């Protein structure tokens, strides 16, 4: 039972997260759905866009998320944080009368990314550098992984004149799929009907990479340290 | 030498014929009414298969553009008979029946059907003396220019085939041999507006049994008549006193079955509306989310049990998950849009839509008299077992069109004419559901009623305003939509009814309802949503004087164009028929029409002198009237080069 307790600040962050997602859903509802002709794609797009937004918001919140000393407790908290959005996703499916997708796949991707990020934060805080820089380094880490690799992908796209039909396109070199946003968007796009030319390879790579990363970050766990 | 060669050839010929008869399977086809059928109607088919060895395969029946399949199993040295009915659409039809096993054709046989045109009057005869029947070559100059007599003995297995028959005559026939079902088929056929003649002469001991036991005088059954006649002469004399507009329509109007099928895609708009998720669902779920947020916020501040926050998150997730499974938020797999026409026999015209999540083969059982797939998929229609098998494909939509007759319902909607344009209406909603946007169409007036609750009774006084007078098709429909305040899908249903089924001018109450129906898919009952356009007949009562307002008597004509209320005359004459109700002693008739551009002249047919007279102001006065309506209907011809609205008549008279 102790395992299920969450710090008060974190509860506030979770509430903020759910609130922002609900507001985004309501805005989407009023902009695109009410008053327009019905198209099943609108709801599938809603799922896609709202999940991408949630991923970015999730990452932003994790920047200030306090990490716990116990690894398992960390995991449980991240899981609770991720799952708090399930009712909203189910609402999207129910409103649109579309068959319910496997929402657990993207949610687990978010969980792995979240645990990796928190472990990285913990590891960095254990390193011997001035504390001002610790948050900065975490931010650089996220920045490099998400934004810079996307820019590199764009440059590669222009340079090699790629013709891309879907996100999991076989012309994209496999290294780019370490970018969590790309893999995440790829999975979602595949679920709502886009093509998948690489099978489950990117997903496996994603999970294995982030599991290894978490493992590496947590090796030197035994030392007590300050946050 | 030559003689022996001839004999040799003759024996070869005989042997070749006999070797054919030694084949394992023998198929006998008996299609149509003695091999004949009327275009645009259903014909009865009897197929007999006799086999010397075991068969476990498929019976395939092909016509010019349709294929039907039926699985067949026969033991060796046995035979089976199949009865069913299929529609004929083309001027040339051939039925080919073949038996297939494992993809190989074991035997096939075909038979040509003589397809007769619309003007042919099919007279159904139930008589022990059919071959020498007195109506065999019966002709007259009015409607019976081409007649064809048909023996209905042992053919009354299907109600739908009677749609091709215009008159039925029963004489010298043991009506005790008719089963209850066959008697009810005949009763429904008469109720729909047809005439049945029954002999009461020397063979009355045979004919006057069962439902015909008390036929001493002509009686009106529904919209049609049962008329006793003593002998052949009587038939000639009284035939035209007992026909009404349904008889005239069957002879004059071209078949529209194929158009009804093709145009039924217009009803897809209604299905689209039903597919939409309702906005109430989204609001309900938003309220659920709101509660979720509030409870989360509350539990931030409650400090006693710290784990409640987590439990809330998991609890709501599970709750929403359960809701998505059981709450009816799933996609509807099957839906239907229908037009129910009570005439008084209820005939339904349905568009059935399905998009099932297909894992196995799907077989749908139908009770309709006729069903057709209209989007080019490979449906396997089995008219013997009344089954449709869908091919196994993922994410496909199926659209089917069907027509069927159902039981008669008692309708109590009556209108009494107090004065020339003033009526008092007594309305009872015959269905248990709400009738939305109900309105009357009486002649050229539309009277909106509003919503009627289930089984609600209402009495209102109405003044006819003739707001639909002389309007072309488009304006006619727009006026009705505006006055009755119809929604988009209701407009589409009414437009389909107006163009493909009938003109409601003779007095109808039209209303829209939502219902739930059951269909049998893979032997399981499924409840499906159904949007219905109901059309109810209105009983007209007159006190002393009869005033039939303009437009109420339906003008019957046939034209290449789609328009119903107007016609572009381009130097081809248009003949229009108006059936005068036999209960009325007519005193005077008025015709109104509107002409735009060009020139036009109207002529009216004089039955006493057998010629066309020019229509003038005094033509239809009391003195001259009898010349023109002596046969029970009025015949008008319009010639010229102009756009005219179809002439409407109003009449005054007394009850006979």
Image: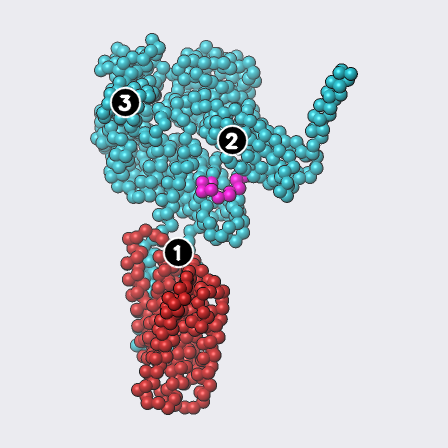
Q: Position of residue B582 (x, y in %)?
A: 35, 19
Give the mark nearest the N terminus, 3 or 2. Answer: 2
Q: Is residue B307 left or right of residue B569?
A: right
Task: Please state the chain letter of the residue tagged with numbered disc 1 in the rendered image.
Answer: A
Q: Closer to the camera, A214 or B233?
A: A214
- The colour scheme of the drawn protein is by chain
Q: Secondary structure at mark 2?
A: loop
- For residue A31, side relative to residue B348 (left or right): left
Residue projecting furthest to the top: B609
Q: What quarter of the picture does the N terminus of chain B occupy?
A: top right
Give how far across and how far down residue B194 sits, in percent: 42, 24
Q: Residues within 10 Å of mark 1 (few under 14, many from 20)?
A: many
Q: CA distance from mark 2 to mark 1?
A: 41 Å
Q: Residue at horizontal 33%, vertical 18%?
A: B635
The dot on residue B131 is none
User: In this figure, which residue is indicated by the disc labeled 1?
Assistant: A97
Query: Which region shows up in magenta?
Result: B373-382
Q: Do dots 2 and 1 share one subunit?
A: no
Residue for badge 3:
B641
Identify the image quadrant of the C terminus of chain B.
top left
Which one is in front, B2 or B641? B2
Please tell me whether residue B598 is drawn above or below residue B536 in the rendered image. above
Quarter where residue A191 is shown = bottom left
Query: Which type of secondary structure does the marked residue at label 1 adopt?
Result: loop
User: Is B441 on the left-hand or right-hand side of B189?
Assistant: left
The residue under label 2 is B158
């Amino acid at each position: 039972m102790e395992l299920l307790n969450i710090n008060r600040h974190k509860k506030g962050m979770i509430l903020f997260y759910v609130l922002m997602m609900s507001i985004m859903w309501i805005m989407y509802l009023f902009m695109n759905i009410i008053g327009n002709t019905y198209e099943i794609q609108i709801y599938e797009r809603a799922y896609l866009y709202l999940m991408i937004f949630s991923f970015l918001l999730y990452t932003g919140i994790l920047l200030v998320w306090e990490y716990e000393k116990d690894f398992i407790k960390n995991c449980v908290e991240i899981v609770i944080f991720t799952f708090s959005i399930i009712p909203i996703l189910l609402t999207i499916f129910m409103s649109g009368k579309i068959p319910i997708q496997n929402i657990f796949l993207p949610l687990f991707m978010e969980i792995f990314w979240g645990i990796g990020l928190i472990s990285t934060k913990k590891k960095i805080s254990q390193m011997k550098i001035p504390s001002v820089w610790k948050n900065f380094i975490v931010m650089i880490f996220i920045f490099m992984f998400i934004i810079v690799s996307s820019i590199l992908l764009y440059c590669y796209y222009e340079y090699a004149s790629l013709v891309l039909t879907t996100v999991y396109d076989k012309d994209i070199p496999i290294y780019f799929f370490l970018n969590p946003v790309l893999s995440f968007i790829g999975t979602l796009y595949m679920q709502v009907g886009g093509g998948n030319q690489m099978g489950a390879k990117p997903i496996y790579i994603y999970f294995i990479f982030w599991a290894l990363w978490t493992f590496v970050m947590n090796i030197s766990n035994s030392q007590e340290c300050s946050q | 030498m030559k003689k022996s060669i001839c004999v040799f050839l003759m024996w070869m010929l005989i042997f070749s014929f006999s070797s054919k008869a030694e084949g394992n399977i023998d198929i006998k086809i008996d299609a149509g009414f003695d091999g004949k059928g009327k275009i645009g109607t259903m014909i009865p088919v009897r197929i007999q298969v006799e086999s010397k060895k075991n068969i476990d395969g498929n019976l395939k029946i092909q016509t010019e553009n349709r294929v039907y399949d039926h699985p067949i199993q026969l033991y060796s040295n046995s035979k089976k008979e199949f009865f069913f009915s299929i529609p004929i659409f083309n001027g040339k039809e051939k039925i080919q029946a073949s038996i297939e096993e494992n993809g190989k054709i074991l035997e096939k046989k075909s038979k040509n059907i003589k397809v007769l045109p619309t003007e042919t009057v099919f007279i159904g005869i139930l008589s022990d003396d059919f071959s020498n029947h007195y109506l065999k070559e019966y002709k007259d100059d009015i409607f019976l220019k081409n007649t064809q007599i048909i023996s209905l003995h042992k053919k009354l297995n299907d109600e739908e085939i009677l749609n091709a028959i215009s008159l039925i005559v029963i004489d010298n026939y043991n009506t005790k041999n008719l089963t209850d079902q066959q008697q009810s088929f005949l009763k429904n056929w008469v109720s729909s507006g047809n005439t049945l003649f029954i002999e009461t002469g020397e063979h009355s001991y045979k004919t006057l049994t069962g439902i015909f036991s008390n036929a001493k005088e002509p009686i009106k059954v529904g919209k049609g008549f049962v008329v006793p006649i003593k002998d052949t002469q009587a038939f000639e004399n009284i035939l035209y006193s007992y026909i009404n507009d349904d008889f005239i329509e069957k002879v004059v109007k071209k078949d529209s079955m194929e158009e009804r099928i093709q145009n039924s895609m217009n009803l897809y708009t209604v299905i689209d509306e039903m597919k939409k998720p309702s906005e109430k669902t989204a609001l309900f779920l938003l309220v659920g989310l709101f509660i979720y947020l509030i409870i989360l916020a509350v539990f931030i501040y409650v400090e006693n049990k710290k784990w409640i926050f987590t439990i809330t998150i998991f609890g709501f997730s599970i709750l929403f998950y359960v809701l998505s499974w059981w709450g009816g938020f799933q996609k509807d797999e099957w839906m239907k849009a229908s037009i129910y026409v009570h005439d008084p026999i209820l005939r339904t015209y349905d568009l059935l839509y399905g998009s099932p999540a297909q894992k196995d083969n799907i077989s749908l059982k139908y009770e309709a008299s006729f069903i057709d797939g209209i989007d080019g998929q490979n449906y396997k229609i089995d008219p013997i077992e009344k089954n449709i098998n869908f091919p196994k494909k993922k994410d496909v939509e199926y659209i089917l069109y069907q027509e069927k007759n159902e039981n008669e319902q008692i309708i109590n909607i009556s209108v009494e004419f107090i004065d020339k344009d003033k009526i008092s209406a007594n309305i009872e909603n015959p269905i248990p559901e709400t009738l939305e946007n109900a309105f009357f169409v009486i002649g050229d007036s539309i009277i909106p009623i509003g919503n009627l609750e289930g089984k609600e009774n209402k009495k209102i006084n109405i003044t006819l305003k003739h707001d639909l007078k002389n309007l072309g098709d488009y304006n006619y429909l727009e006026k009705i939509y505006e006055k009755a305040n119809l929604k988009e899908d209701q407009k589409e249903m009414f437009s389909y009814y107006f163009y493909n089924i009938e003109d409601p001018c003779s007095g109808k109450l039209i209303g829209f309802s939502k219902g739930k129906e059951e269909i049998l898919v893979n032997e399981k009952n499924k409840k499906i949503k159904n949007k219905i356009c109901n059309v109810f007949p209105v009983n007209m009562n007159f006190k002393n004087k009869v005033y039939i307002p303009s437009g109420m008597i339906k003008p019957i004509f046939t034209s290449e164009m789609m328009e119903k209320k107007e016609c572009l005359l381009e130097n081809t004459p248009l003949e229009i028929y108006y059936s005068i109700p036999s209960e009325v002693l007519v005193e005077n008739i008025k015709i109104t029409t509107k002409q735009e551009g060009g020139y036009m002249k109207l002529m009216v047919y004089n039955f006493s002198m057998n010629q066309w007279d020019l229509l003038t102001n005094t033509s239809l006065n009391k003195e001259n009237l009898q010349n023109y309506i002596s046969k029970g209907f009025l015949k008008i011809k319009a010639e010229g080069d102009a756009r005219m609205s179809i002439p409407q008549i109003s009449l005054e008279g007394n009850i006979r």
